[in-house]
Image: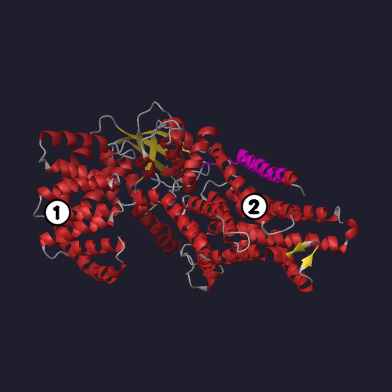
Amino acid sequence: MGARPFRVGLVLIWLLATVADRLWWSHHTGVPSWDQADYLNSALDHGRALGVLAGGGWQGWNALLDLSPKIPPLASLVNGTVMAIAGDAPAQAAWSLSLWHALLLFSTAGWALQLLRPNGAARGFALLAAGAVGLAPMLLELRTDYVLELPLTALVTLALWRLGAWWSPKRGGRWWQALLAALTVALSLLVKQSALLVLLPALGWALIAAQRIGRGRRLQVLAGLILVMASVFPWLRHNWITTLGGTNRAVIESAAREGDPGVFSLEGWFFYLRQLPLQIGWALLWIGLAGLVLLILTRFRSPVARGFDHRDCSDAWRWLVGTLFLGWFVTNLSPNKDPRYMAPLLPPLLLLLSRGWWQWGLWVRQRWPARSSWLPGLALSAGVLVAIAPAWSLQSARQRSRHGDPLEAIVARAGGADPDADPATLIVVPSTPDLNQHNVSYYGRRKGGQLVGRQLGGSRDHIQPVLDHAQWVLLAEGDQGSVRRSARSLDQAVRESGVFEQLETFPRLKGGSYSLWKRRIDSASPVGFEQRFPQLATGLAKGPSGLDPIFSSVAIEHMLDGHFSYREPLRRKALEDLERNPADDSARWTLALLAVLSNRPAEAAHHFALLETSHPESPWPSAYRSVVLLAGWNPWSASSVASAAADRHGPNPLLESLESLSAVLGGAVWRIPEAVQALPAAVSSVEESLKPQEKGSS
């Protein structure tokens, strides 16, 4: 096969897949559920931050990085840009998935070209592998599911291909290969941290090989690592604390909550293997495996088959099989199990299975040489038809009509999707796949709108703040979805309080209804959060005992006011107060706390440094300053501040722990035992400082 027919064939595979995807979207008009709406919101946020979508504009790098506190921003940046071109309806936004699929097909075909020679055979095999990727049920599902696994799979496949090309003992080791591999690794990590599950063992293997080969590759490794760190560091430096917290909740806590099988249990090790027939399809899996057995038997007879020398590409196959196994092994070590986490390993697995399919073609040609011009093609076509069946069945089962779904009507009634409406927050008490705080926010902010959804009701402590300050509330009659019992108490309180009036009821497709409530005009609110904030901020001076009231109040306020509209007026007033009186402690604490809540550690450190001067008797400004310097990825300054404060204030377990921990994070790994030893005393000192507060509240 020539180069031009190969390119045409690859484009044709993508076009056929895209047509199938668009047909699916034309029939599936259901609203996005929790995860899908969350990622659509992220794309919308990043598109607005870039200034390409209505309702936003460029506000600087820090504002852009604020939008991705837990998951890297690359996919959302690309998806938001596509949304600006294609439109912000879910089906329109899904055009980005077609672009990611094009990258996946290109990467798979490019990798396949390295596995077979001569070129004519390799191109045919590459088209076969690309077709397998287009037909695999799991990958087909991800092309029509607005989550991050498709961009992740595309970029991890690209990274493994380019990393293997550089690793190759015979054809690798060039500088351009090293830099391209490093760039693709960085891009993968900027889509989702779980790329490390597949790339980390592959990188380890490649780095060990580089150490054995010589100095030239070691320099390339160093340059590549610098490129990866330079690409990832700005986001990681800005969000490393929230990323760690989010990863812990998504991996450790989620696994415990969902009852996933243990890491070292037999059930856990077979979890992903049991998913393969559904993810790949029985035909692709078993015909491919049978072909691999046939290949092994054929190689025992002769290493050369029909002009293909297996020995010529043995390194490429070794890389494919090795990275596939290592990736599966490390992925199994993750406590949180989900079928789609296996997605990045499906393309290399399909490459391997495609080799089995290819072997059946060689076998047919050898057995019936007189019919070799048409019989292999006929057999392949029959196999493709068999492979289409499970993918078609899966997609058909996922189709869902939105006929009768009230989400858009509710959002419109509350003023959403209207660029001229004032910013508003709708408190969503129920949480169901067809209506939740995430898809309310997405539909409420389409077309430049400013309505966001937030969920309250997870605690009885939410009831009074909602009655005091909420403007819009959405309740459900019938199924409440995945909410706690306390949500029913909030539901009842809103209905019986007399503070809210019911504007409209919206029937639900599966029975029941949603009701939209708005605060009555004559219902006065108690003192607002802006008035209470300075007193809360001053509570920082008490140390740990002042933190819980602050963050408990802030957490609820951020639900009641999804736009954080309290921040700018408070900031302006505090600055004005300091102009009139530079010694105004309340204003300084206010600015420091606002900087912490806005994730501006350098600004917070500045204010805490001034508070150190104005409160020389207190260790807390120094402790806070050390913490925010550490959060700003400046462990050396954090250690220095904590050390100086410990000298001034005498023995202080918290400051001593901060000093040793900061030193370790700054590179003083020999102080790890000291940091570990200091931690229990620091925890005890914090607990002691909280005891008076506990007694007062009991």
Q: Along the polypeptide, which appears first: circle 2 or circle 1?
A: 2
Asked if residue 595 shows in the view, the reply is yes
> Is residue 361 magenta-colored?
no
Circle 1 packing at 10 Å, graded few (<14), some (14-19), many (20+), is: few
Judging depth in this view, the residue of 415 and 286 nearest the camera is 286
User: Quick one: 242 or 613, which is closer to the camera?
Assistant: 613
Provide the residue designation for mark 2: 110
Residue found farthest to the right: 370
Amino acid type indicated by mark 2 = Gly
User: Count of labels shown?
Assistant: 2
Question: Does 316 sit above or below residue 192?
Answer: below
Compared with 488, 359 (above or below) is: below
Q: Position of residue 406 (x, y in %)?
A: 49, 37
Identify the residue under disc 1. 542
Residue 237 position, x and y percent, is 35, 51
Give the farthest residue toward the left.
617
Task: Identify the residue at horizontal 50%, vertical 33% (top origin).
Answer: 84
Is 19 a magenta residue?
Answer: yes
With 642 as the anchor, is 291 left or right in this view? Answer: right
Q: Is residue 309 left or right of residue 374?
A: left
Residue 698 appears in view: no
Residue that appears at 51% across and 60% down = 199
Instruction: Sort mark 2 into few (<14), some (14-19) or many (20+) by Cα contacts within 10 Å.
Output: many
> Could you say whether the residue bearing mark 1 is in a helix, strand or loop?
helix
Q: Which residues are magenta?
A: 7-31
The type of colouring in the image is secondary structure
Relative image position of residue 608 (x, y in whole percent): 18, 48
Secondary structure under tag 2 reads helix
- Image quarter of the C terminus: bottom left
